[in-house]
Image (tube, coloured by chain):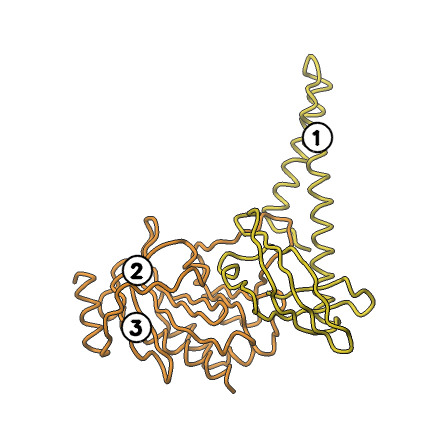
Amino acid sequence: MAVSESYAQLAASRGLRPAEGFAPGPVTPLLTKGGRIERALAGSLADSIEGVIGRYSYGRFDYNVVFARIPESQPFVPRLGCDRKGRITDDTHYGFEVRSSRLWTESEKLNLRFKVTVSPFQDDNWLRQLFIPTFIDWLGESSPGDFSFELAYGSLLCSIESDDPGAAGLEALWEAGGTVARRIHEESTE
Amino acid sequence: MQINRTGYFLLGFFFIGGLIFTVLEFTVFPFPIFLGPIWMIVSVALGIYAIRQARRGRHEQWLWKTGIKGKGTLVSARSGALINDQPLITLELDLELPGQAPRRVRRRLIISSFAAHLMQPGLVLPVYVNPRDPEDILVVW
């Protein structure tokens, strides 16, 4: 099935509307690569959170992404990366200098599939409250196989690396984006 | 300690390589070209830099945990050079700290690209100040 058909199918099943020209700017690490989001579709992602799903391309890389704004999270967790283990990410650390992020490795189950990075000045108690066991179980066992997400100053970007995940893959990404957005929103407003 | 595997590799590469070259230069080569000693000096300089950075990292953690917490309202932000592909930004902040008179400070920070665009006047950032040294300030971005 062509990518455009998969997106059309997702739009029909979820009631999403076209969001042509959607450009959130370089607000998360992946989005600083300077690519473009195409085939963007917008709609209600979770509770009161609006989301946009689209195909993000830069250079020879293609991702399918879900973007949402959760500004209420900023005071609690300004920066959070939950990247699939093995995914190549920018780590501009050359071996000696003070790091601008640190690994959060408290959850062994999460460590099996993900690399979690936060600000060096992140409150660990809040992270423990965010990563409740049910959320960790879902991330570890039920989230899409190549799923990652990053949260930067209230901007959430969930992504999968498959070039053409098909309609079912896009459905799973939209669903996963909603689960992550809902969890962050709930914990930030508690 | 801030040194990662890349750091240890670089330290080892320059030190051991420098040592081997130094021995060769003064025993096998017809005349020394001082490449070995230069590499060893580089490894020592990198080691000193790493120790200083590690100390700075520990101090920042200490400030974050024990410093006086306040807020800094951004007055201006100017970006200059790129260091390790990240912008070096000069921030001018109006500090508000409990029990202290408001004051304006300037700090230069290396900030990730995705955060740099947020550095607009009016933005409020958490700051931590050393209780014994008011000029010792940690700006958390």
Up-down: is B117 above or below B7?
A: below
Q: At 57% from the left edge and 71% from the top edge, which residue is drawn?
A: A106
Q: Colour of chain A?
A: orange
Q: Position of residue B54 (x, y in %)?
A: 70, 54
Answer left or right for B6 relative to A175.
Answer: right
Q: Amino acid at mark 3?
A: Ala
Nearer the observer, A136 or A176: A176
Q: Which residue is mark 1?
A: B19
Which numbered dot is residue A162? 2
Chain corresponding to yellow in the figure: B
Corner quadrant of residue A21: bottom left
Circle number at residue A139: none
Q: Where, by quadrant of the figure, is residue A5 drawn?
A: bottom left
- Callout in the foreground (1, 3): 3
Of the 4 image quadrants, the one containing the N terminus of chain A is bottom left
**What is the three-letter code of the residue carrying label 2?**
Ser
Residue toward you, A47 or A169 = A47
Q: Residues within 10 Å of mark 2 (few under 14, many from 20)?
A: some
Real-space Cα distance between discs 2 and 3?
12 Å
Where is mark 3, residue-wise? Answer: A172
Q: Secondary structure at mark 3?
A: helix
- Does the CB distance between marks 1 and 3 fall below 8 Å? no
Badge 2 or badge 3: first in the primary sequence: 2
Q: Residue at x 66, y 41 (%)?
A: B11
Q: Is residue A63 left or right of residue A125?
A: left
Query: Residue drawn 43% across and 70% down?
Result: A156
Same subunit, labels 2 and 1: the answer reads no
Disc 1 secondary structure class: helix
